[in-house]
Image (tube, rainbow, N blue to C red):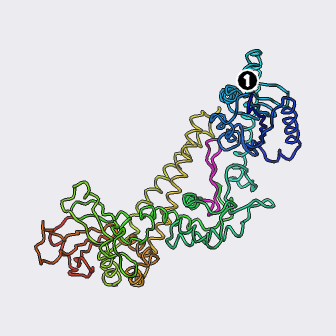
Amino acid sequence: MKNAKVYSYLRFSDPKQSAGSSIDRQMQYAARWATEHKLTLDDSLTLRDEGLSAYHQRHVKHGALGVFLQAIDDGRIAPGSVLIVEGLDRLSRAEPIQAQAQLAQIINAGITVVTASDNKEYNRERLKANPMDLVYSLLVMIRAHEESETKSKRVKAAFRHQAEEWLAGNFRGRIATGHNPEWLKWSNGTWVEIAERCEALRFALRLYKQGHSGSAILVMMSEKGMSLNNKGLPRSTNFYRMLLNPALYGTRNLEIDGQKYQLENYYPSIISHAEWLELQAMISDRTKRGRKSEIQPVISGMGILRCGYCGGSLAGQFVGGKRKRKEDGTPHDGHRRLLCGHHSMRACPVHGSCSSVPVENAIIDFCSDQLNLTSLTSNRDLTKPVHQQLLIEKNKAKDTQAQLNNLTEALLSATTDAPRTFIQKANQLESILNEINSRIAELEAKLAEATKIEASPSLSAEWAALAEGVKTLDNEARLKAKQLVYQTFERIIVYSNGLLPKSGRKKGKSAPPIDLILIPKGGKPRTLRINRKTGEWIAGEDILIEKQIQI
C-alpha cells in the first residue's frame, strides 16, 4: 500500500542485554524482510526501549512503543505497514487481556506484526483464515505474563529478605530496587558521595535555612554552575521534594509489596537527623508564609493577621501596578496595603484598608526595644504545649508497643500456623508505631528549638539590626524580619480605622489612627495605637483591653 513502511521494535528490560548480537540480528532480519516485500525500512521513529519493563508497562507509558501506539492513533502510521519484533513477549508481558488489547490495537489499524523468532505474521486476513493463530498468540502472552509474575514475586521476596537482613544487622549491601539519591553513587560495594553534587546540595540547604525560596536557590546555583544531577537543575517542585527526602540524614524508606521498611544509616548522611527534623519544621512553617515577591512582605502571608472588626484574615495587597513610583523606583507606601478577606463579600462591617508600611514599622520598632520585647515574652513558656503533646504521643507509643508485645507473645505461643488476620494486625501496629515515633522525634526537635528560643538573650538586638533594612526594602532583611514575626506572634489584630471607626470623616479632620493588638506566642497581649502614615506610637498602654474588647 502507498506510504506503507517496515518498522523494527527492540526492547530490553535490562540495558546490558543490548550488548549482545540480537540487535544486529533483528535489524538484518527487518532489512531483509523489507527488501523481499518491496517496502522501505523506516527508522525515523526511534523504536528501541532499553531498561523498560513490559510487565509494568513502562515501555508504553515512557518508551518508544507508547510513541508508536500514539502515532497509530494519530493516523501517522499508514495501513499496510509492518512492525517487526523478536517475539510477542517483547510487545507486552502485562495481563493477557491487556496484552492482547495492545496487539489488537496494532492489527485493527491495518498493521502486520511479524515475529522474527518464529517468522509468524499477525494481521486481520491471516487471523481470519487461521483463528488458531489468535489462540497461539494468547497462549504466548499468558506464558510471558506468568514468567514475569513469577520473576517479580521472586525478586520482591529477595528484596524483602535483604531489607529484613539489613534491619537485623546481617546485610550491608545494595538493595537494587527503587530510586536512590542522585548525589550518591554505588562504588566498590558502598555508597559514596559525588563531590560536586554534594557541595551543591549543602550550598542549597544553607540558602534555604537563610530563608531563600526554592526558585531563587536554583537561580543562584545556576549562576555558580552547580548541579544536583546529570540532567541539570531540577524544577522547584522537585527541589522541595528533595528536601523532604530522609536520605539527607542517611535513612532509606522502602515499600516492597505493601510492606514498609525504614533502613537507618543506609546512605552517607548530608545532615544529622535533628537537622533534618528542623528542616521539616521549617518547610511546614514556610508553606504558611507565602512566596517571595518583588517586595518581601514582613507581616502578611503567614495567617497571623486578623481584622479587628470581623475576625477575618488580613491579606497583603500591592496596588501599585503602573502607577507613578518614587524617584528611586520603589512604590509609594500607600501602594502596599492590608485588606480584610471579608471585604469583597461585604461581611466586614467596616470598609476600607490601610497601608502595611506603618504597621510593619511600628512592630519592628516596638520589638527593637528590649523592655517592650520583655513585656511581650514575660511569663512565656513556649515549651509547655510542645511538652504536653510529646507526653501524649509517648503514651500512645507505650500503649501501641504493649499491644504489639501481647500480639507477638500470642503468635509465638500458637501451636498452629498463625491466622493471617493476626499477622496483618501486627503489621498494622508496627506501621502505627513507626508513625508515632516519627511524630515523637519531630516534637523533640521542636522542644529543643523552643528551649533554645527561651534561652536566647536579647532578641531585641536582632530586631534592631534589621530595622533599617526593612524600611529601605532590603528583601534579605525583610525575610529575616518575617521569620522573627512568625516566631514571636500568635496573632496580630488590626483595627485599620481605629478602635471606634466613624462612618465618615469631616473635612479638615485628621485621619484616624490604626490600633493593634499584639498577641505573642505564650505571652501577654499588648496593644498599640499608631499614626496611620508613619507608624509612630500615639499610645502604648492597654487602651483596647481597658475598653474590654474581646481578643
| Name of the residue lying farthest toward the left | 506
- Image height of 5 relative to 134, above or below: below
Q: What amino acid is at disc 1?
A: Leu
Who's the residue at 53% across and 51% down the image?
Answer: 433
Report the quarter where the N terminus lies. Answer: top right
Q: In which quarter of the image is residue 301?
A: bottom left
| Front residue (pair 174, 200) | 200
Q: Where is residue 195 in the image (x, y as percent from the top left)?
A: 71, 69
349 sits to left or right of 185:
left
Q: Label 1 neighbourhood size at 10 Å, few (<14), some (14-19), many (20+)?
A: some
- Image height of 70 relative to 224, above or below: above
| Front residue (pair 53, 509) | 509
Can residue 118 be seen here? The reply is yes
Who's the residue at 55% across and 61% down the image?
Answer: 236
Q: Quadrant of residue 205?
A: bottom right
Can residue 521 be seen here? The reply is no
The span shown in magenta is 246-262
Report the quarter where the C terminus lies. Answer: bottom left
Residue 255 in the magenta stretch? The answer is: yes
Q: In which quarter of the image is residue 510?
A: bottom left
Q: Where is residue 291 in the image (x, y as percent from the top left)?
A: 45, 65
Is disc 1 placed on a helix, strand or loop?
helix
192 sits to left or right of 505:
right
Q: Position of residue 392 (x, y in %)?
A: 43, 56
Q: Where is residue 200 in the image (x, y as percent from the top left)?
A: 64, 69
Residue ID for mark 1: 138
| Front residue (pair 462, 108) | 108
Tally of marks: 1
- Image height of 397 relative to 23, above or below: below
Who's the residue at 29% across and 59% down the image?
Answer: 341
| Front residue (pair 61, 159) | 61
